[in-house]
Amino acid sequence: MTTPRTLLTACGVVLFLVAGCSRWSEVTHSSDVPRSPTDFSVQGMHHAAQVPLILSPVHVSQNGAGMTTTSEFERRVLSHLDRAHLFSYLTHEASGPPPDQQHVRARLTVKETAEPHSGENAFKGFVVGASMFLLTPWLPFEYDFSAQMVLDIERWDGQAKRYLASSEGKAYFHLFGATPLTIPELEGRVTESCLTNLTQQLIADTAFFTAPQTVALTP
Amino acid sequence: MAGEAEPSLPVGTQEVGLSVGYLLPHRLTDDHITKQKGPAFMPSWGVVLTNPLGDAWYQGQVILGAEVVYLIFTEPTVTHGIGFTPKIKYSFTALDQIRPYLEFAGGPFWTDLGDRIPEQSSKFHFIVTAGVGIAWFVTRNKSLNVGYRFQHISNAGTSMPNLGLNASLPFIGFSIFF
């Protein structure tokens, strides 16, 4: 019967193409997030009790080698911390001298680990090519990325606290689904996960950032 | 990534290119008498699969893709050949703007020259290519290429005679990366 066979072949071709063009990623958090930001009554903190946050230059290393931190990343960190509504304003240390008023100083260290599976991917590429691309759907290429962030906070009175967050992710892509965005997307998701986690930890610790003379938290 | 990375082609970058060259025959035995010659056109596509491997002069990236080979044999008679070959390329990245590369490709090839010469008896063949080249990146995503390939065409013994056709193929071309 020609029609069912043709239909079956067409379905097979479509499945092959869809599978061969796909890409996906998985991100897992290594640290437990206590609660979501909306669970916290940050609104209970009077604006007058808030102090400014000064961010020291962010230190980034990948696979043990130091890297030049992008200003975009530092803006992203400040933007995340700003979303917590814990501080009266946020600024970078390089923007000017610290304010005279009570303030909080933050130092972020980022340790990234990239495992590009280069040898394995090159071998898979050879096999996929040798199969005239027929093995494309069964041999996805892989890329691993993880990040560990350490946020050291020092209060106006010298008290210090350390917040840790880590996250790891894995990207898979088939030959026909490859795009230069695959890896940056994975790295972005892992970074976002860490920053969100850190922000949530700060929110959970609201009292630590509140100036003593004006503490006013909701019960 | 939170930091600034070294410049190289990111994994997943696509390469589209076109090369043109001229086929020059090699008669490797006394039984080879055909002097197949003519222009060659090779549109190609590839994907960067790896970050730079190694950290010495041999540092480079693996690019996997495919190529269509279209040959016009002007001698001994005007005939044509067309093939489709998966292609794997190792691009040396240590020099950044000037990137030498090695490439290997192989796949099915059809030509109507096949049954008109004493060396080959069929139209269906396989083509195998090994080559070297240099890509000069004139911008971050465009390169001019020049290189040399050795090309072998035969039918893997599916019909006799099957002496095989061998040729040199110097070429020039360009690639766009996105």
Image (cartoon, helix red, strand yellow):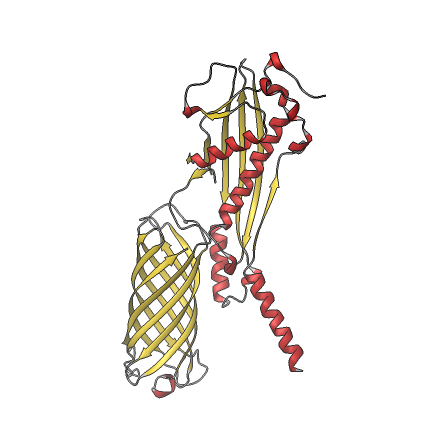
How many marks are shown on the rendered structure? 0
- Can you see residue A44? yes
Q: Residue B44 sits in which quadrant?
A: bottom left
Position in image of residue B40 (x %, y %):
32, 73
Q: Is residue A66 visible?
A: no
Which image quadrant for residue A219? top right
Instruction: Identify which residue, B137 or A78, lies in the foreground.
Output: A78
Pinpoint residue A132: horizontal percent, then vertical percent.
Answer: 49, 68
Residue at left offset 52%, top offset 21%: A52
Q: Residue furthest front?
A: A47
Position of A198 compared to A55: left or right?
right
Q: Is residue A3 left or right of residue B107?
A: right
Which of the image's four quarters has the C terminus of chain B?
bottom left
Vertically, is A93 above or below B132? above
Percent across and percent down for residue A58 are 46, 30
| Residue depicted at x 67% and y 77% | A4
User: A75 and B131: which one is in front?
Assistant: A75
Report the front residue among B107 and B43: B43
Q: Position of residue B154 (x, y in %)?
A: 39, 78
**Left or right, A197 with reference to B144:** right
Residue lying at the far top in this picture: please name it.
A213
Q: Which of the 4 image quarters holds residue B85?
A: bottom left
Q: Which residue does the image show at 57% across and 44% down from the upper left?
A: A169
